[in-house]
Image: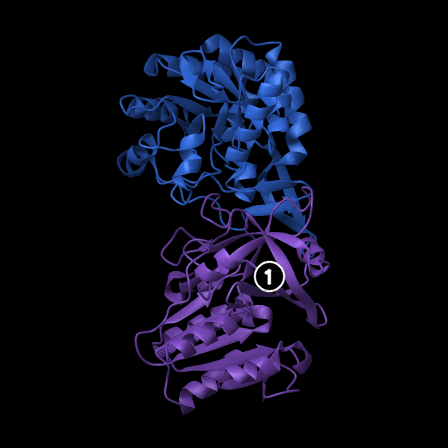
Chain colours: A blue, B purple
Amino acid sequence: MTNSVELGELKLPNPLMLASGTWGFGETLPRKILSSVGALVTKGLSLEPRTGNPPPRLSETPCGLVNSIGLENPGFEVFRNRILPRLLALGPPVIVNIFGESEDDFFRLAEGLAETGIAGLEVNISCPNVKKGGIAFARDPEGVFRLVRGLTSVWERFFSVKLSPVGPVEEVALAAEEAGARALTCANTYPAMTVDLSRGTPRLHLGGLSGPAIKPLTLRLVYELSRKVKIPIIASGGIMSARDALEYLSVGARAFQVGTAILIDPEAPRNILSELDVALKDR
Amino acid sequence: MIGARVVSQREVSPGYFLLKLEAPEIAHQARPGQFVKITAWEGRDPLLPRPFSIHEVKDSHLWILYQRRGLGTKLLSKIHRGETVWLSGPFGRPFPLPEEGSVWLVAGGVGVAPFFFYAGVLRTHNIPFRFFYGARSKGDLLRLKHLQSLGKLRIATEDGSLGYQGFVTDLIKVQLEQEDRPKMMVACGPPGMLSAVGQIGEAYGIPTYLSLEAFMACGQGLCLGCVVQRRRGGYLRVCLEGPAVDSREVALDKLS
């Protein structure tokens, strides 16, 4: 049976997307997992390579994971020449998550990716663990409007704006929609930290919380936003099971992303999809 | 993930446990130095499976030797014979097997865990090895009798209650001056010890592999969470480039 969904002009074979930064570039995952999903959203890509943040990069919290990877990635050139061809050959639409420290970085990435055969972009204005760019955009609806409007002049196809769950979320969402975003990814991780009590200092400061702990929070955000915007919402926040996904779909999400669940079990996307098939048949 | 039946579990020393699992597929694939991930609880707290080096393998069984440290290992330590845990792996690069010459295995504390399996395989390949094992005190040395049956063993304890008094790193420095030097050293233990063994190996021109430990999420290169600093810049993923890496790749002063 088919569960295909349409996000504007982008048609996905099913509503499950692999979330950015949670599946590497697929090097170590079985092909059957990668090829079964609705779309592959790549790890955040910057123009230049980024080495990422020093360790510790992970901290576990009750039902959650705080990460501070710092957008480690090989940069545009290596990605386009050595990684992207392999991703495109997997089958599902490839959506490239782009990150910049300035508006111009985003525009140049979009231009560079225009002729590569990717299905769309996810514009990352919400990474909580970098000092420049990232979540700074999420506090500035006008800045988001300018960025998104600018992008529409260099990128004419599908793109989703990945929102931060904090800040003036609704204003940012409306600004992105008005400026021409085709979808919203709701949402990135929650800014979070953990403490090393033996030293009395932060263990991980610029962290982002993901996992089941955040699901009720992001669920509410998706519900609220879906009543404010007309463009499709892609839910992302603590989805571990088909039931979680159905909850998001029932409150207004058109598609959803699975992330932290993959780190626990790479089979999770396939399990969620087959459970979802059964659940949707029952309805 | 697969379900693996717990064949047995016992506390071999206060706070240290030996777990025997039936997992034919993983046991057959496993190589010394690799690790598995285990979930031994229902629900989502703790959220992540825990990584453990493979202690020993025989036929369809594998053994894990671990220390009870946090919530994950506490829950695992309460699992009984006949129960099922969730297992995935094996992950990571195996320990190297030298073409010729001997290997010195240098273990600190519970870092001895992966060397039982390694020693067995070295023996099968007729590769000569010597075993150096350090701990705080006699009571902290794990599975000593079994270890002695595996091959030549030298012990160091910080309090001198057994063997050489001092750090195992001091003991190997003494031995390097007295004996034929090995073709390779492989070390597993706390970060300070690994850093010291790396420095010794480099000072004596002996290729040295350090089996690193890091808090880990996916265990297979997806999240980039378990990194250590690479000496020439950037980071190494403990789960993928390791756990055992050439000491010259690692920024030894940054190990923690």
Q: With respect to residue A14, does B222 lie above or below?
A: below
At horizontal 47% and vertical 46% (from top left) the residue drawn is: B224
Q: Is residue B226 above or below residue A182?
A: below
Which is nearer the eye, B125 or B221?
A: B125
In the displayed structure, B12 sits above or below B29; it is: below
Q: Position of residue A273 (x, y in %)?
A: 53, 29
What residue would you read off at disc 1?
B21
Q: Position of residue A214 (x, y in %)?
A: 65, 32
> Which of B87 and A166 lies nearest the eye of the viewer?
B87
Label 1: chain letter: B
Depicted B126 relative to depicted A249: above or below: below
Q: Secondary structure at mark 1?
A: strand
Q: How many marks?
A: 1
Can you tell which quarter of the image residue A84 is in?
top left
Q: Is residue B167 visible?
A: no
Q: In the rendered view, does B230 fall on the left or right side of B2?
A: left
Residue at figure coordinates x 71%, y 60% from the top left = B80
Q: Is residue A263 visible?
A: yes
The residue depicted at 43 percent of the width and 33 percent of the height is A44
Which kind of residue does numbered mark 1 sit on? Leu
A236 to the left or right of B220: right
Residue in the picture at 46% in, 72% down: B118
Q: Position of residue B11 (x, y in %)?
A: 70, 69
Query: Which of the 4 image quarters holds residue B205?
Result: bottom left
Measuring from the top left, give residue B83's x and y in whole percent: 68, 55
